[in-house]
Amino acid sequence: MKTSSSTYQDTSIWRFFASVRLAVFLLITLAITSIVGTVIPQGESLQFYLETFGPNFFRIIKLLHLYDTYHSWWYLILLGLFSTNLVVCTLKRLPFTLKLYRRDNLSVDSGRLLKMPFKKEWEIKEELDNDSTQSIISAFKEVVGKFRERSDVDGGKLFLAERGKWSYWGVYGLHGSILIIFFGALVGLFLGFKGSVMLPEGEKIDQIVNRQSGEHIPLGFSVRCDRFYISFYDNGAPQEYRSDLTVLNDDKEVFHKSIVVNDPMEYRGVTFYQASYRAIPEVTVQVAKSATLHRSLTISAFQRALWPEEQLSFGLMQYQPNVHGKPAAQIWVGDQEGREGSFWLLKGNKKEFKKGENLYKISLTNAKQRYLTGLQVKKDPGVWIVWLGCTVLIVGFAIVFWVPHRRMWLWMGRRKGKITVILSGQTNKNKLQFEKDIKKIEKALDSSLGARQ
Amino acid sequence: MTFSSSYLFSLTTFIYLGAAALYLTHWIFRVQKVGLLATVVTVGGLVIQTVGLGLRWIESYQLGYGHAPLSNLYESMVFFSWITVLVYLIIEWQVKRRVIGAFATPFASLAMAYASFSPNVEDEIQPLIPALKSNWLIAHVVTCFLGYASFAVACGLGIMYLFKNRFSGASEGIIGVMPDCKVLDELMHQTIIFGFLWLTLGIITGAVWANDAWGTYWSWDPKETWSLITWFVYATALHARFVRGWAGRKIAYLSIVGFVAVMFTYFGVNFLLSGLHSYGAQ
């Protein structure tokens, strides 16, 4: 009798995808091919590979995407095959497992009980009275706990203690967990983003740049870096990187948090990690046109400081923290007409410069390092799915390998004309513990039945 | 020499080397009493090493750093040898076969010897760099090393299996005293299951930690990738039992190949490849 389902299950392609052989082949192939990406540097520019490996090997690298091995077409095909193998294997085994799970282990006869891996038979001369029947059952119960019973089985009474039948489902959890993890990774890939930002102290951002696509992603709120701290141990090793962050919603402060490595900040599903830092110099200069008309200006690297009334702009070109014990800065000055010039200033010394008809005096009053904190920013709605998968993986693994399906039968009745008591049992794991337990029952029965044989 | 952790670790090194020699003697010359002595010496070494680990933890607090002794290559190797001996002793206690000791304790003594004598291994207590300051440090290192230690023992069992299988006719002599192939195969399988669970937990705790520290639970860093390669090898070994003709010898080979992958994950990545786990090389 062939059903439609068994026809497609008989095709060789189905059997191929359901086989453990394919699983073993894929695991070995994944193990070997994964080495490639640890030997060849990943994510470099194509130019780098051409220079490092030469034109011939470069062609292979380009063809097989070995610059990004784990996202290459062939690696994804392997992972796809791996997933298919898991799914098909599950579908193939499911009816078999269901049958095992639904099997009524009370529907046995005394002959089958005597074919179990563990069995013991007592033949008794006289009929068992109520008291001795009870004492046999209680000896059984003491070891097994809960049990089911059915009378009139093969002309006798049958007791069954069955444990861990559900453990047959463990393997589906274990295999399914891999698919759950893959699914979580895909959710993160399509619905999340990863980016980074260098944020100067005192400034805020409301968007970040996606690391992969390069597009700007608006956050919907802004984050300000109030301060960045770095501290060192006595031996010079870094002790802590810390950024004091403030989350702002429509320019209203929502909350503050100090983040360090290993302790990120999360807001509306977006997480900010302390990743790196940079120090940029910042100098303060005093510029005077006359005794009464002067201005103090702070100039940061990569930024302009303006004195709009005088139509002057200043920039910091170079900074030396220690010139003869004093900080020195090369200052750039420009005016409206596009004329510009630069000069070095040593702290404490005054310099004069001319712009148009005017003569200005300038001095360096202060110099310090200003920090930019490097934040890793990410949103990954799939991460909880991945953690769920990991949990299922561990629980499934423990069930598959350590939860046994144990069955212990006790049968009392007439067999081949003799009053007989049969104790038998089977387990699929941990035979040692099983034998210990069933021997305990055997011993108890021996002492109560031994005299009557 | 003062009573310090480094003194106790030097002592442990010699004790474990002695224990390995005793187990080998017990195996080759089949002297029961030497076997018992080997066990006693190993347990003694384990106790001294445990005290040493505790002392080193205390010393790190006295230096003002205050962290578990699991932060660099030296400490990880001491821990590897400690946990390998522990896992082996549990197996010895369970199966009551001391011959296995001749194939398991050498891993522990070699790890200690390398940690103590190699000029490449810095044995001073160093402060924790920011990346390692996490509660996940202990969970991650302990789970990974339980895996590594089990795989070391499984590798020893694999070597024994191949010996025994090669000279299966011998019922006496140094091969004869080894447990039967069937017993070795089952033991190897159980040890791999145990190690596989811990390796999986090690990878997961690593992923959770990486997600906290770097913002991504998997970044294909060489150490991560090699731990996955190792995972693939042992997953193969676990599935191979269901393929006809794969039990026994092929799984013994896989157990050895798997341990090579473990060693590469542990050392090779640190010394030969660069990546996020670079602090492991110091």
Image: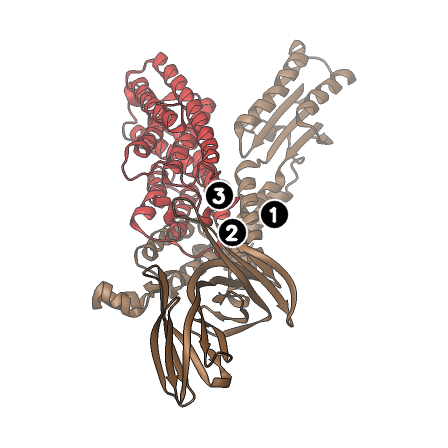
Residue A132, x across and y down, in percent: 74, 16
Chain rendered red:
B
| Residue behind mark 3 | B137
Whether discs 1 and 3 lie on one chain: the answer is no
- Check the image and name the residue furthest to the right: A130
If the image is split into quadrants, where does the N terminus of chain B sit?
top left
What amino acid is found at the position of numbered circle 2 in the picture?
Answer: Asn
| Residue behind mark 2 | A262
Residue A340, x across and y down, in percent: 36, 84
* Along the viewing direction, whichever of B280 and A236 lies nearer the viewer: A236
Report in which chain the residue with disc 3 lies: B
- What color does chain A have in the rendering? brown
Point out the frontmost of discs 1 and 3: 3
Give the secondary structure at mark 3. helix
Give the secondary structure at mark 1. helix
Report in which chain the residue with disc 1 lies: A
* Along the viewing direction, whichever of B281 and A16 lies nearer the viewer: B281
> How far is the residue under mark 3 from the one under mark 2?
11 Å
Point out the frontmost of discs 3 and 2: 2
| Residue behind mark 1 | A98
What amino acid is found at the position of numbered circle 1 in the picture?
Answer: Leu
Point out the frontmost of discs 2 and 1: 2
